[in-house]
Image (tube, coloured by chain):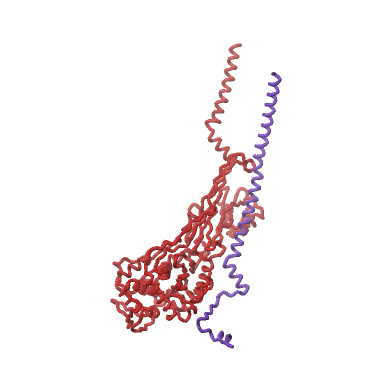
């Protein structure tokens, strides 16, 4: 009976020690994982920054003012010519169409 | 022996009582103070700034975005080489070195802001020098991918009295509450290095980012309007001008251009009068463009009919005033069509007499003149409409041809829009929906203010306006193959109680295609020097924009 009690006491003591060590290990890990958290946050911030820069670049490159300037440099003309076939054709066109 | 024992016991007891009292002092009486000190040491408090909402064109492409920027500050006590620091900052920030030096000398502060809204590129250059005592706090600034396009519509972001970002003018001003958002914060325990302790106390309130605005503005139409307006102003040697293009059926603004303008990203470099949007805030006398509204009123009331003839024999005298035609030509008996084709002031006065003074005033009120349109833009203004007791016979007469009455371009284009859409006066608006970051959308619907004209009257008037374009002063310059309903206007400018002999505001208002108008547009050219006439300045600008719009919208000729 006394031996049984001693074994139980020893077991409980051992369990207490193990749990104490586990607690210390877990809290220590939680306390130091903040460094990893910061570095992940920094990485996220870097990616967000790059994302933001690319958004601006895309917006700028697809801006109508940019496209207009570039298209003119490639020789595209701006003013469309509307030719109405209902009205009599100008003489130049008339000559071109006649046999 | 017993007594000594008791004495020692009492002494030890007193000692422990003192310790307990002291512990009570620190752990109970001063607990809040010590907790505060501990929190300050171990906790960090970070403001998480909310992003300001973006402004998008009708196709979702951005007109205004946010861009990372930085506040540059100095910690004077950490600066090692003052001269070098000042020199580098002055060069990279574009600030006078004398002003930076002066700030450093005058203050004993340990934290000194030097410049705000500095771009990342400039900050990266400063960081390369690795100078101590220079710090950066991230903030954001507005970025305009289209440059200064739509400046008057967009407005700009400045600072309020508290030094916080605030929108002014246009959409930035009107929708400040929606765009601003609400900052969040993060309160967390940190270790000695400043790293967060995840198992510690953490209190976080997420920021509420500002909402995005999706506009009715079509970027392409806006670009065309601005380009053609600027070309027109330069060609005709004008002081300025406006173009307002609206969907007549919904009242949504498709484009609004005005010059002179400014760069909203650099607004401080421009005089403050440039911030005013002339389309919604500047008044002018509309001149002959107003005739269409008075004619429509007379037709609507049945006071004149399509076959009514008017005697344009000569000038009309009203009291001490004489009203002539613009070119001193008189055609005898003319039809209503011809009144608009010849742009006859005399003809319009006679039509107005048929309509009557009370009805004219009623229509002016019904068409929204003298009141704000309540468009969703900050800075709208409206010239007042005089009360009936201040109207005399000559005022009714001159109002019939658009003189002696002041309107804004927005009021004018909206009123003509009522003719284009069959008689309904629409509430103009610029924002069609508001989106938050969770993609919840609030749609803004169109609103009919009131029915002003009957459909039959507007149909008749539309035919007259087409006839005015086809047979009037603009017959040689209008795009061939299209039916455009329009009217020229040339109004003298009132200066110090009389009309200037030379200066005019030339205008043209119209809509197309007449079978189902896609747009109603008003062009005003202020004080053109090449020619004072609307038919020779504003009308060509109108038609050049209209040609582009026909092509853009795929509108085939009639």
Depth check, front residue: B194 or B329:
B329
Q: Residue furthest bottom?
A: A99
- Measured as percent of width and height from the top left, residue B214 is found at 51, 60
Residue shown at the point (50%, 81%) measured from the top left: A86
Looking at the image, residue B114 lies above or below residue B506 = above
Query: In the rendered image of this protein, does residue B440 appear above or below residue B541?
Result: above
Q: Position of residue B320 (x, y in %)?
A: 29, 77
Whether residue A57 appears in this view of the structure is yes
Q: Quadrant of the N terminus of chain B?
A: top right
Q: Quadrant of residue B12?
A: top right
Residue B237 visible within the image: no
Q: Position of residue B372 (x, y in %)?
A: 40, 63
In the displayed structure image, the side of residue B481 where residue A59 appears, left or right: right
- Image coordinates of residue B72 in percent, x first then y, are 59, 53
Q: How many marks?
A: 0
- Asked if residue B456 lies left or right of residue B195, the reply is left
Nearer to us in this view, B404 or B463: B463
In front: B296, or B506?
A: B296
In this picture, residue B273 sits left or right of residue B498: right
Chain identifier, red in the render = B
In this view, the residue in front, B1 or A43, is: A43
**Chain letter for the purple part:** A
Q: Quadrant of residue B394?
A: bottom left
Q: Can you name the residue that lies furthest to the top here?
A: B1
């Amino acid at each position: 009976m006394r031996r049984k009690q001693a074994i139980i006491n020893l077991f409980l003591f051992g369990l207490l020690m193990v749990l104490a060590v586990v607690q210390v290990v877990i809290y220590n890990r939680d306390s130091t994982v903040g460094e990893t958290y910061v570095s992940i946050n920094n990485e996220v911030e870097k990616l967000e920054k790059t994302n933001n820069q690319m958004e601006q670049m895309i917006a700028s490159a697809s801006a109508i003012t940019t496209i207009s300037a570039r298209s003119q440099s490639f020789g595209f003309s701006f003013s469309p010519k509307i030719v109405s076939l209902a009205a009599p054709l100008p003489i130049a066109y008339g000559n071109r169409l006649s046999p | 022996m017993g007594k000594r024992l008791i004495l020692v016991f009492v002494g030890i007891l007193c000692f422990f009582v003192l310790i307990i009292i002291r512990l009570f002092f620190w752990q109970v009486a001063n607990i809040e103070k010590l907790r505060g000190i501990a929190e300050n040491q171990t906790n960090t408090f970070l403001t998480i700034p909310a992003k300001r909402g973006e402004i998008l064109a009708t196709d979702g492409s951005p007109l205004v975005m946010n861009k990372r920027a930085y506040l540059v500050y100095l910690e004077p006590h950490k600066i090692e080489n003052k001269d070098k620091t000042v020199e580098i900052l002055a060069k990279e920030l574009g600030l006078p070195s004398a002003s930076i030096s002066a700030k450093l000398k005058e203050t004993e502060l340990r934290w000194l802001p030097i410049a705000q809204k500095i771009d990342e590129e400039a900050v990266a250059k400063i960081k390369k020098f690795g100078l101590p005592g220079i710090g950066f706090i991230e903030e954001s600034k507005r970025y305009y991918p289209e440059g200064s396009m739509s400046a008057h519509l967009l407005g700009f972001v400045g600072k309020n009295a508290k030094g916080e970002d605030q929108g002014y003018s246009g959409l930035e001003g009107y929708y400040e509450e929606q765009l601003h958002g609400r900052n969040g914060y993060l309160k967390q325990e940190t270790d000695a290095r400043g790293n967060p302790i995840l198992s510690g106390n953490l209190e976080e309130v997420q920021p509420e980012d500002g909402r995005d605005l999706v506009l009715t503005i079509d970027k392409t139409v806006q670009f065309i309007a601005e380009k053609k307006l600027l070309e027109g102003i330069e060609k005709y040697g004008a002081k300025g001008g406006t173009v307002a293009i609206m969907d007549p059926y919904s009242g949504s603004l498709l484009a609004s251009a005005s010059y002179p303008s400014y760069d909203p990203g650099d607004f401080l470099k421009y005089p403050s009068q440039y911030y005013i949007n002339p389309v919604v805030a500047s008044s002018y006398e509309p001149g002959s463009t107003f005739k269409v509204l008075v004619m429509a009123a007379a037709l609507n009331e049945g006071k004149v009919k399509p076959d009514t003839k008017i005697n344009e024999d000569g000038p009309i005298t009203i009291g001490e005033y004489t009203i002539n035609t613009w070119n001193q030509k008189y055609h005898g008996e003319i039809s209503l069509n011809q009144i608009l084709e010849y742009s006859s002031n005399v003809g319009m006065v006679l039509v107005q007499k048929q309509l009557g003074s009370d009805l004219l005033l009623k229509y002016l009120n019904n068409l929204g003149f003298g009141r704000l349109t309540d468009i969703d833009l900050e800075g709208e203004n409206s010239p007042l409409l005089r009360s009936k007791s201040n109207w005399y016979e000559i005022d009714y007469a001159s109002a019939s041809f658009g003189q002696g009455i002041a309107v804004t371009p927005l009021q004018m284009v909206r009123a003509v829009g009522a003719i284009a859409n069959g008689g309904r006066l629409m509430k103009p608006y610029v924002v069609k929906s508001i989106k938050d970051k969770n993609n919840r959308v609030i749609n803004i619907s169109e609103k009919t203010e009131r029915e002003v004209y009957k459909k039959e009257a507007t149909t008749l008037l539309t035919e007259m306006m087409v006839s005015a374009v086809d047979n009037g002063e603009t017959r040689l310059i209008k795009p061939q193959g299209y039916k455009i309903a329009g009217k020229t206007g040339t109004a003298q400018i009132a200066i110090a109680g009389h009309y200037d002999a030379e200066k005019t505001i030339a205008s043209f208002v119209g809509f197309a295609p007449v079978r189902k108008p896609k747009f109603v547009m008003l062009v005003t050219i202020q004080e053109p020097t090449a020619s004072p006439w609307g038919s020779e300045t504003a009308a060509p600008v109108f038609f050049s924009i209209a040609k582009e719009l026909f092509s853009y919208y795929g509108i085939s000729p009639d």
